[in-house]
Image (cartoon, rainbow, N blue to C red):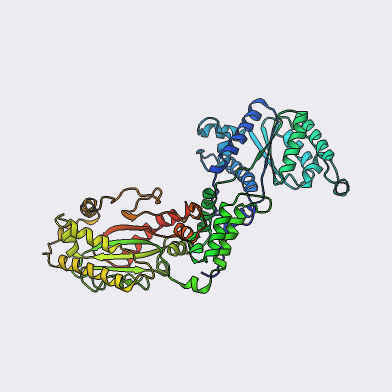
Amino acid sequence: MEYNRIIYPERAEYLSEQKFRSYKVFLSHWDALSAKIKSNFEETHLRRVSKTLIVYGAQSTGKTLLANKLSQDFAATTAVLQSGASLTYEDTNVWHRTVTGFGKNPELVAENTRATALLHIEDDTAWVEKTKQFCGSHTGRTALVIADNCERDYFVQGLLGISDIDFLRIGRTPELVRSAAQRFVALCRGDLRGAMLLMFTNDDLFAQAFEAAVNTQHQGLVEAAAMPMPSPRDKETVIRVNTNRLNSFSYWYCLDRAGIDEKKNTYRTLTAAPSPKAPGGYKAAFEAVDRAIQRATPSRIGRPSKKCLLTFFVLTDRDDIRGAVDLFALGNYTRNVNDNGILDVATYSDDWTSTLRFGDERSRKLLQSEWNLRVVVVGNQFVSALLPGTRRPLIRRLIDASLVYHGPGTQTQTLISHRRAIDVDIAALAALPCSNNAPFWALGQVRSGQYEGELRAILPQYSTARPGFMHYMPDYSPEPYRPCELSSSTSDSDSEINEAIRRSAVACEFTSIKDITAQQLQTYLDRKLPNYVDIMQEQ
């Protein structure tokens, strides 16, 4: 890790920059507001009446993010239609949600997109004249006007035609706001009739005063609505997912390396109710995570930690598997069994993705920041006992023992006892006759049907969906994955905070490689590992 800092966008405007392109916008906590926007659009579009919604909220609560996303999604939809390509409804497209009518109708989205013109304004005192010209040049279409940061002087100045000098001299008085509201009503009944205005502001008092002043003259023309705030859990999901998508180490890594005080500070930031003194928005939460890793001491950065464990269990056509692990060239490893020719278990803790090629360097480092890799290699003696199905208890014990994960700080006697228990089962396996497995190895790819049938009988959870893995299904997961979730704590006690971030997932993938080589294993890993990156970056 080059810096003990995280990359995150300090403002929504920065999301167009290349380094933030992978930022994921979550929409679910906007559902109620999206319904209001949709309702206003439908009234404007169907009845040619003006409707205005003023959305207010503290800084860093997502107002500009929503304003920009609506504009960008409209532009993206327009581009698809202009290209002649068929349009597909997208749940992540705010514009599609706004104009789809009842259900998810791409034909209606296309029709409404062609019948709409969108203007995005901000910090422009000439906005009234430009909006009048815009509406006048699109008389056959519904005009959607988005005005961001409308608490700034430009908005009222534009309505009243006041210069900067005069505005500074007069100041924003209640009388001025009432005059601006009167002018706004006249515009909505005249040049802006049939336009939908969507305004965003961080000044709730201005929003409510403007709403009251307008509606005194034209009831229902303006509605003020608070920007919905996500629950602590939803907010943490946004922070966790985007920390993972933008950085080469995970959200969990930042908290694990931090001291308890910084863990607690992050928890309190995530769960705090917004207020003028502590807005509690996304920026504050990102800052807390950044501070957590930034203030981690060198001793905490360098210490080993118990990560999740990702195991690849490899069956191979060898009578003696000694030396197979050394062929893989995956870096330094710890051997977790005593020397034998039947079963080898090697665990890689650091820099184990350096020779792999999946994804990009950032995503490879991200994965290894939260997962250790283990490779288990078994040869023909194991295969001979597995396939007939007559030694299932013994095979189950060996598989389970191979997946036992002792974290840093485990007592030496515990490790010795574990190895001795494996030695007993390996000796029992070695005493069995070894059958001729040539027909099995000659089957090629279809041989998986044979060993997977036995694995299903031995491991009841084999190839079944497990919590935490989303759409992906590891072959076997005795311990499911759960995202690091500080907000699940019911208090900020040391024990609860540490429990919330503790890693315990164990996932295992089984495969058979007849003549095992580094290239074959690495190709297999490159195919499987992106699924685990997705698990970290999507939830």
- Residue 313 in view: yes
| Corner quadrant of residue 520 | bottom left
Q: Position of residue 429 (x, y in %)?
A: 16, 65
Q: Residue at x 22, y 67 (%)?
A: 421
Q: Give left or right: position of 396 versus 48.
A: left
Q: Residue at x 81, y 33 (%)?
A: 182
Q: Position of residue 308 (x, y in %)?
A: 39, 61
**In the displayed structure, would residue 503 be above or below residue 71?**
below
Q: Residue at x 34, y 66 (%)?
A: 406
Comparing 492 with 316, the one in front is 492
Q: Position of residue 461 (x, y in %)?
A: 29, 50
Q: Give left or right: position of 217 versus 499.
A: right
Q: Position of residue 90 (x, y in %)?
A: 51, 40
- Residue 248 in view: no
Q: Residue furthest left?
A: 433
| Corner quadrant of residue 20 | bottom right
Q: How many numbered circles are shown?
A: 0
Comparing 494 with 271, the one in front is 494
Q: Give left or right: position of 94 versus 276.
A: left
| Corner quadrant of residue 350 | bottom left
Q: Residue furthest top?
A: 47
**In the displayed structure, would residue 520 be above or below residue 299?**
above
**In the displayed structure, would residue 114 be above or below residue 522?**
above
